[in-house]
Image (cartoon, rainbow, N blue to C red):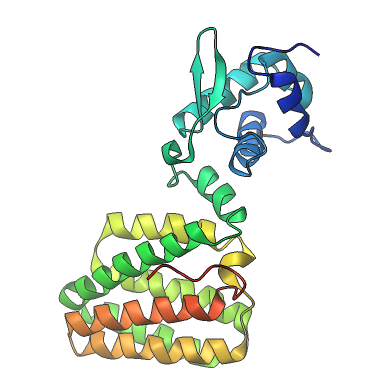
Amino acid sequence: MAKNAGGAAEESAVLKPWPKRPARLAHAVVESLTDTIVSGALPPGSTLPVEPELCETFGVSRITVREAVKSLEAKGLVRARQGSGTTVTQPEEWNLLDPVVLAATVQHDDTLVVLDQLVAIRSALEAQMAAQAVELATDEDLQDIERMLSRLDEETATPARFDETDVAFHDRIMQASRNRLGRSIIRTVHTQARTTLLYTGAPDTTGCRQANAEHRKVVERLLARDSEGAAQAMTEHIEAAWRRRRLPSAAPPAP
């Protein structure tokens, strides 16, 4: 096996070929390499295996590999330099709002550092949007939100259904805020966070009832047209829900 100056021969051993050839080849290569980088198997400063080795490992063409490497560069994961190979960058350079990077990051966030940060961002943005919804929500918006709250009351005994409606409930409030950018950011980070048990935990009926009592406080403040109260109620709900789900063995969230 050929080696480049960065020792790519040894590093290529961390890459595993697929048991079944995926349909979207370049995207699949990107997902696999992203996971390898984010997990630390290819640490910052290391060099990606050379092009022929990547082609052999994944069973794809040079064009596919080049497309995948360009995508990794766009995500901030690697930097290609003539004569120096393609080097893994420092985590500070990674684009965590990219769905592929974020998905891999939360999957490997064993200490919950990133998930704690994600919850803090979600809490701040959703609180702001709850306050905006007080000012901008129509009567129809508020009626829809009340109906969803009633539906959640009925689903507390079925955590899986409750969880899906819970997401829709929060999204409906964000819609009522008319804050398209904030909603887009939350939908991106929350969708990826929900792919890991580190974030979702193991929902139970007690947790569902507690969550919906907190939902009710948010809705009460929305109906009262109380911007500050709605923001505070949303913050308290998101942070309390995370404390209930968060693994006790992990480091405590930052104050």
Q: Residue at x 18, y 72 (%)?
A: 136
- In which quadrant will I find the C terminus? bottom left
Q: Residue at x 84, y 38 (%)?
A: 19
Which of the 4 quarters of the picture holds residue 65? top right
Q: Residue at x 46, y 69 (%)?
A: 253
Foreground residue among 59 and 2: 2
On the question of residue 216 being in view, the answer is yes
Residue 49, placed above or below residue 218: above
Please count the marks in the image.
0
- In which quadrant will I find the N terminus? top right
Which of the 4 quarters of the picture holds residue 158? bottom right
Tell me residue 9's x, y (percent): 75, 20
Tell me residue 114's x, y (percent): 48, 57
Residue 254, placed above or below residue 34: below
Foreground residue among 66 and 241: 241
Tell me residue 110's x, y (percent): 61, 59
Say left or right for 82 vs 66: left
Foreground residue among 230 and 114: 114
Q: Residue at x 60, y 73 (%)?
A: 247
- In the displayed image of the protein, which residue is found farthest to the right? 19
On the question of residue 15 being in view, the answer is no
Which of the 4 quarters of the picture holds residue 171? bottom left
Tell me residue 97's x, y (percent): 42, 47
Say left or right for 234 vs 99: left
